């Protein structure tokens, strides 16, 4: 009888706790759904989606004609679906981004964040939108001296640095727990791209990056090479600062539609289809094309030169750097034509058909002329053109930011000789985090100006007029 009573009591409490748990869970789920519905409604009524975005090439940056970046474009598309505007808070490292995870005023954190098991215990992830593999990249010189790694076992004694509180550091800790000897340092001082630059300059042996980030950066750093994949494919997703079922469900629904209608494929192709940049110094080919391609566009360069008082050789050299004098040229970022104008820039210049040679040349000449006018008056002589060419490449805002840095570190902000030393600093976190326009590939602007001048000098040596004489009516 006692056993019966004991068993009955246990059964009673088991049923009680089950029913209590089920009711509590139902109430909680209902409450969460109601909170979620209210939050989603609040976002729509407020007209603003507050997002944290990592300031980097793969996520968000200010380009020559406005905001760019794969995750920025994705969030912008989602905000349009909601009928609201994006309010962007920029950060410079993954660690900084994750510090916003408990901020109730933020809705989404976007920083190319891998959806790892450890992170899922801590953070509230939304739907996955991308897959990437973590890869080990190292300096090419290591191939020559026999130190280039082919597997995790080969990482012993190499100088490896990765970002702190990233999926990379988490993966390394996992491998070390599995018994691998990896000499890795974790840092919050440098972004992933800065660490890639340190590999490129041989300051460190290797670092870890996501495969999509490597694809973007191998275009800019000639001394890096892929060693091996160090992880299986990992999903990337946004972090929601609150567990909001209605918002998450809306994201899943929208992302499914965005994928099925082909927009996701187009966006990935826009940023990650590997297209080699035009060669900077292939002078033999350039000399041949002066004869074979330039003559068909020469008249338009001459006319634009007269109208905007910009030397013929400058416009022709700029066009060659942009398109190799191919009127149908198209880049993976969507710029078109002889002067490779973006859609936004073309519209502002009144260019209706970017592939039409005359329209493109006149539009590009006007754009360069506008850049020259926007250069501060203190910049004089030939430096004024070089500043304008740099702005044509990365935008005037970034050139002005570089001037600010030059002034801060005691260089002449109005001299191209000094500015070309400063522009590469725009990709370094310690500098761009304080600047109005943030991150930029300033080193590419320096190469760009040098390349245009190289082509220009060759044109001049081939007796191409610097500036046609003004005609009189």
Image: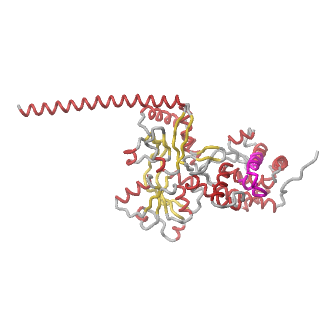
The x and y percentages for residue 424 are: 62, 58
User: How many numbered marks are there?
Assistant: 0
Taking the view exactly as shown, the residue that stands out farthest to the right is 473
Compared with 339, 428 (above or below) is below
Furthest-bottom residue in this view: 145
Q: Residue drawn at (28%, 30%), measured in percent from left and top?
A: 22
Of 245 and 465, nearer the camera is: 245
Q: Quadrant of the N terminus?
A: top left
Q: Position of residue 447 (x, y in %)?
A: 67, 58
The residue under the point 52% across, 67% down is: 143
Q: Position of residue 138 (x, y in %)?
A: 51, 62
Above or below 236: residue 426: below
Is 245 left, or right, of 430 in this rendering? left
Where the C terminus falls, by quadrant? top right
54 versus 382 height, above or below:
above
x%, y% of residue 92?
53, 51
Look at the image and name its color scheme.
Answer: secondary structure
Q: Work out which residue is located at the far left of the displayed protein and give it.
A: 1
Verify whether residue 82 appears in magenta: no
Q: Residue at x 46, y 35 (%)?
A: 252
Q: Nearer the viewer, residue 294 or 244?
A: 244
**The image quarter in which residue 197 lies:** bottom right
- Seen in the image, is 302 located left or right of residue 64? right
- Nearest the viewer among 46 and 294 is 46
Mostly what secondary structure, the magenta segment? helix
Q: Nearer the viewer, residue 415 or 148?
A: 415
Which region of the structure is painted magenta?
365-389
Question: From what the image shows, is residue 394 above or below residue 207?
Answer: above
> Is 8 left, or right, of 300 in this rendering?
left
């Amino acid at each position: 009888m006692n056993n019966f009573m004991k068993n009955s009591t246990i059964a009673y409490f088991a049923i009680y706790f089950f029913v209590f748990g089920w009711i509590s869970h139902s109430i909680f789920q209902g409450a969460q759904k109601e909170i979620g519905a209210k939050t989603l409604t609040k976002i729509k009524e407020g007209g603003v989606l507050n997002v944290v975005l990592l300031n980097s090439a793969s996520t968000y940056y200010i380009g020559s004609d406005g905001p760019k970046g794969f995750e920025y474009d994705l969030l912008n598309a989602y905000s349009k679906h909601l009928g609201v505007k994006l309010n962007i808070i920029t950060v410079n490292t993954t660690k900084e981004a994750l510090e916003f995870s408990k901020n109730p005023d933020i809705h989404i954190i976007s920083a190319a964040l891998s959806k790892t098991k450890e992170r899922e215990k801590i953070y509230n992830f939304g739907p996955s939108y991308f897959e990437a593999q973590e890869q080990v990249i190292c300096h090419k010189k290591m191939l020559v001296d026999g130190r280039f790694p082919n597997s995790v076992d080969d990482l012993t004694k190499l100088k490896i640095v990765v970002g702190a509180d990233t999926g990379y550091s988490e993966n390394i800790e996992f491998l070390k727990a599995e018994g691998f000897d990896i000499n890795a340092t974790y840092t919050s001082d440098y972004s992933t791209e800065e660490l890639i630059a340190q590999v490129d300059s041989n300051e460190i042996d290797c670092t870890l990056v996501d495969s999509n980030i490597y694809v973007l950066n191998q275009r800019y750093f000639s001394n890096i090479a892929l060693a091996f994949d160090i992880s299986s494919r990992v999903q990337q997703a946004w972090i929601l600062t609150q567990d909001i079922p209605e918002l998450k469900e809306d994201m899943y629904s929208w992302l499914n539609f965005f994928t099925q209608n082909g927009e996701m494929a187009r966006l990935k192709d826009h940023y990650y289809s590997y297209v080699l940049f035009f060669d900077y110094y292939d002078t033999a080919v350039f000399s041949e094309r002066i004869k074979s391609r330039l003559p068909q566009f020469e008249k338009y360069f001459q006319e634009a030169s007269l109208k905007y008082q910009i030397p013929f050789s400058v416009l022709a050299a700029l066009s060659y750097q942009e398109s190799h004098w191919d009127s149908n040229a198209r880049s993976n970022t969507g710029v078109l034509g002889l002067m490779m104008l973006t859609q936004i820039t073309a519209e502002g210049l009144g260019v209706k058909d970017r592939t039409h040679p005359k329209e493109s040349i006149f539009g590009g000449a006007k754009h360069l002329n506008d850049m020259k006018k926007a250069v501060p008056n203190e910049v004089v002589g030939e430096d004024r053109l070089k500043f304008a060419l740099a702005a044509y490449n990365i935008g005037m805002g970034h050139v002005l930011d570089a001037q600010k840095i030059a002034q801060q570190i005691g260089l002449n902000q109005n001299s191209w000789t000094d500015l070309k030393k400063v522009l590469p600093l725009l990709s370094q976190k310690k500098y761009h985090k304080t600047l109005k326009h943030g991150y930029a590939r300033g080193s590419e602007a320096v190469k760009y100006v040098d390349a245009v001048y190289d082509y220009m000098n060759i044109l001049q040596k081939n007796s191409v007029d610097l500036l046609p004489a003004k005609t009189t009516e």
